[in-house]
Image: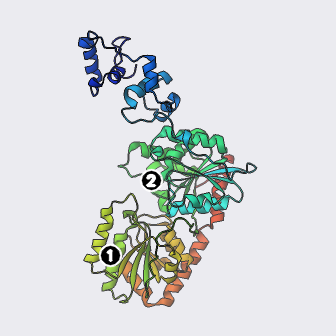
């Protein structure tokens, strides 16, 4: 009997409630009193028969999977799992089976005569880490059987499948249930036998923990800040465990490394490496729009990224306003490429549009959303303004320099600023943190002197090519970290 005193062997409050519709909603204590005071005397039955119980349990219910899906429940065996489901679980909307056992684990592209590598990414959107993951998967597929585990869907699912990669997609809600995640990882371990797993960002911490528990070697990449102090304690502890116990960890910028050391201590550096990825190719996917907006004529200052607070689009608008007062060319346009992040309230974008209108920038600042041909904008751009508050190595900057377009950025806000500030030919592209007036002054200078702007773009291209790894080298370095960890080679 689950969750109630053992009044006598003929009574269970959960089963009593199920049997009598007039008692639906009563508490366990109230049901017990009803049974003692009047139920027995009325000839009521305090428990379900075996036949009744079997009829109430759906055919898709599997007790062992119920226990695995909800490990927090006070059920010691399969019989108690059935009792809990009947008494509470069904009314609470709990599932009677693991979703993990019902997922598709394809082996279409598995050759079996070469090592298998598991790449874990949080989503399949057209954003930084998923695009990087797609590039890494494409590179590794030449030498490995690549399995991609997606924690949620997105427009790039088919692009991953076209890479000769087998793709497993977690169902909605699964990443929030440790039992489901563990079951999925265990199935992946049995089906694909990965020699190593690579967690592509800190957001995959739930899967990374399950990978550690399954004994699969793990290389964990950190492209973002650690969880802030107000995050749930379980999240902070889980990310910390992954940082401490992974076979190797990878930081994409010094500012990321320093944040993790501050949060979790210097001990994590024993297995840490700094690897800066270079420019990536953008995969195809679902069409972005029926008609593509035309690239504006005249000088263009480009901003690229999701419309979300971390990317700082409000600073982009603010810099445009300052540039107007600083005498920027009248026909200059500030164009932001990127859609609102699904996790960002629509009110943020509405406030941004209000800011544009209130600043008198209608027609001068455009929120273009996602566009099919980003390269057309890079080819037309005079400069890119990187306004992120925290952004280790954003694709926007890497792609801009690959096109010889100069990138103006804030000191202390990105790994791009770290690289540029360290070279005398490019340090002038870095302005003080969130100083939009300084950014505006520099943009005016660049647009007034196209030759200087092109020279700055070429210098940035040279510096990033020198200090960042091409995709094939980056992918190979990730695998090498796990191999080095096996023989105990030191890191940072």
Q: Position of residue 372 (x, y in %)?
A: 50, 73
At x 61%, y 72%, the residue is 466
Q: For this rendering, which residue is in front, 269 or 64?
A: 64
Q: Position of residue 370 (x, y in %)?
A: 45, 70
112 sits left or right of 98 in the view: right
Q: For this rendering, which residue is in front, 252 or 490?
A: 252
Q: Which residue is mark 2?
A: 226
Please state, as top left, top right, bottom left or bottom right, where the N terminus lies in the image. top left
Q: Residue furthest right?
A: 113
Q: Position of residue 353 (x, y in %)?
A: 31, 72
At x 62%, y 45%, the residue is 217
| Vertical comparison of 113 with 318: above or below | above
Mark 1 vs mark 2: give the one in front.
1
Can residue 77 be seen here? The reply is: no
Q: Which mark is residue 299?
A: none
| Vertical comparison of 395 with 219: above or below | below
């Amino acid at each position: 009997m689950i969750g109630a005193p053992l009044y006598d062997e003929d009574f269970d409050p959960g089963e009593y409630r199920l049997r009598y519709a007039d008692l639906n909603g009563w508490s366990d204590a109230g049901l017990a009193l009803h049974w003692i005071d009047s139920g027995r005397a009325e000839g009521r039955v305090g428990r379900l028969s075996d036949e009744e119980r079997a009829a109430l349990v759906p055919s898709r219910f599997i007790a062992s999977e119920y226990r695995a899906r909800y490990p927090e429940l006070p059920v010691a065996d399969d019989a108690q799992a059935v009792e809990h489901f009947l008494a509470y679980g069904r009314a609470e909307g709990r599932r009677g089976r693991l979703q993990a056992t019902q997922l598709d684990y394809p082996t279409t592209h598995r050759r079996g005569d070469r090592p298998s590598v598991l790449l874990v990414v949080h989503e399949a959107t057209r954003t930084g880490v998923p695009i990087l993951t797609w590039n890494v998967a494409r590179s590794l597929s030449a030498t490995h059987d690549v399995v991609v585990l997606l924690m949620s869907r997105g427009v790039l699912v088919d692009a991953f499948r076209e890479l000769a990669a087998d793709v497993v997609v977690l169902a909605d809600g699964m990443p929030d249930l440790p039992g489901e995640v563990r079951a999925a990882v265990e199935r992946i371990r049995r089906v694909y036998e990965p020699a190593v797993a690579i967690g592509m960002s800190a957001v995959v911490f739930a899967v990374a923990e399950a990978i550690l528990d399954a004994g699969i070697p793990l290389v964990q990449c950190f492209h973002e800040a650690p969880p802030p102090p107000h995050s749930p304690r379980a999240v902070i502890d889980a990310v910390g465990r992954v940082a401490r116990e992974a076979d190797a960890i990878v930081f994409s910028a010094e500012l990321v490394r320093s944040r993790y050391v501050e949060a979790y201590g210097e001990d994590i550096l024993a297995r840490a490496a700094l690897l800066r990825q270079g420019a990536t190719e953008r995969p195809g996917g679902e069409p972005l729009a029926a008609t593509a907006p035309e690239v504006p004529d005249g000088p263009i200052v480009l901003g690229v990224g999701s419309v979300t607070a971390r990317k700082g689009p409000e600073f982009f608008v603010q810099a445009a306003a300052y540039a107007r007062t600083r005498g920027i060319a009248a026909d200059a346009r500030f164009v932001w490429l990127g859609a609102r992040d699904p996790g960002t309230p629509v009110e943020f974008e509405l406030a941004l549009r209000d800011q544009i209108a209130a600043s008198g920038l209608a027609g001068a600042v455009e929120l273009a959303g996602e566009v099919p041909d980003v390269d057309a904008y890079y080819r037309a751009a005079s400069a890119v303004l990187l306004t992120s508050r925290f952004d280790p190595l954003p694709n926007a900057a890497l792609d801009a320099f690959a096109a010889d377009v100069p990138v103006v950025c804030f000191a202390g806000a990105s790994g791009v600023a770290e690289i540029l500030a360290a070279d005398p030919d490019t340090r002038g592209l870095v302005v003080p943190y969130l100083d939009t007036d300084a950014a505006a002054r520099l943009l005016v200078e660049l647009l007034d002197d196209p030759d200087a702007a092109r020279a700055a773009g070429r210098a940035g291209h040279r510096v990033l090519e020198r200090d960042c790894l091409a995709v094939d080298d980056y992918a190979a370095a990730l695998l090498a970290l796990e191999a080095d960890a096996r023989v105990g080679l030191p890191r940072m």
